[in-house]
Image (tube, rainbow, N blue to C red):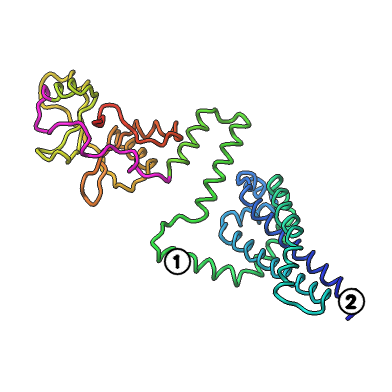
Amino acid sequence: MPAWLNGLIVILLLLLGVRISAFFSGSETGFYRLSLPRLSIDSRAGDRKAARLLWFSGRPGYFVATCLIGNNVANYICSAAAGNWILLMFGRTSEGLEVAATLLLAPFIFQFGELLPKSVYYLIPYSSLKRESWWFQIAYVLFLPISWPLMLLIQLLERLQGKSDQTPEIQMGRNRILQLVMHGQREGVLTDLQSQLANGLLQLSPQTISSSMIPAARVLGVSDRSSRNEMLEFARKYGVSAVAVYRGTETTSWYGYAYVAELLLTERGWPLIHPMPVFLLETSKVEAVHRLQIADANYGVVQKNGETVGIVSRNGLVEQMFRPSLGAVSRPSGLTTLS
């Protein structure tokens, strides 16, 4: 084979590898920048390219797996081009020559196969992905015999390790909701307060109430055998607006609370004790707020292995939704902890 033809093959292999690398690297970056509402609208309007991307948005694991396999294929092609270049230049190959060729080609491959396409897809993700969606569909079908067993293996390992059932779709959904909130605020659809609440919900949703509860040993309260006057005296002494109540003589078995205002208005009879919903220690903060709202309760009991470990406040959790950056343990009014 003539030398010029070998040289042409080397150049074509290198350009092909760089082009494939640019395609999959850029697609992976652009995929995380897609606007799901826009995809849905265009898909319903009959845009087949948008419908194709919308299908992948519901299966992000397959999209990412296809990108990873495609990048590996691009690396193999670039390695083959480097090896053929060494043979063409020196008539032989060795580890030292291959390393030297890789170092010489690395800046070119990185610039045009990684950095530049990622920047382009980051700035204009929608149009870039739509333009090449058909080629990605072909790559997905070609790589499916490899990507599908890989996804099954990952799911099996996650089940064996006892991980949560949260799928990549949930993580992608969180990113897209954040994008939607940002677009809504930019266009004036959402106020600053609404955007702050949405961001607070997204930040608090994976957090558990363990970081926002008052430990059972530090809750100010009295026994349910205490009279109305005893509860009022306790409230005056510690300056609380609600008095926690435990059963009998078990000082950590909290189960209810009494408002000082109600105690003052009730001159006779036994004090009105509001029951507290029971939460597990691993309950999320958003779920706790929802259940407290449904039960119309301001406080809830936190348990672990059937034992009471603390109390959580609805007002304290709601306050964190509007000020999620604080990340501090909530200190609800009334059931104050001892310092």
Query: Badge 1 is on which residue?
Result: 157
Foreground of the two, 162 or 104? 104
Res. 249 mark:
none
Q: Is residue 211 magenta?
A: yes
Q: Determine crowd level at label 2: few under 14, some 14-19, many 20+ residues with C-alpha closer than 10 A.
A: few
Query: Badge 2 is on which residue?
Result: 3
Q: Position of residue 30 (x, y in %)?
A: 66, 51
Q: Residue at x 38, y 61 (%)?
A: 162
Disc 2 or disc 1, which is closer to the eye? 2
Name the residue at the front extreme.
96
* Quarter residue 271 falls in: top left
For the N terminus, which image quadrant? bottom right
- Check contact, mark 2 vs mark 1: CB within 8 A: no
Q: Position of residue 93 (x, y in %)?
A: 75, 77
Label 1: state its secondary structure. helix
- What is the three-letter code of the residue carrying label 1? Leu
Q: Is residue 161 magenta?
A: no
* Quarter residue 114 falls in: bottom right
Foreground of the two, 132 or 113? 113
Q: Residue at x 78, y 79 (%)?
A: 92
Residue numbers of the magenta segment? 206-230
Q: Determine crowd level at label 1: few under 14, some 14-19, many 20+ residues with C-alpha closer than 10 A.
A: few
For the C terminus, which image quadrant? top left
- What is the three-letter code of the residue carrying label 2? Ala
Q: Position of residue 138 (x, y in %)?
A: 69, 65
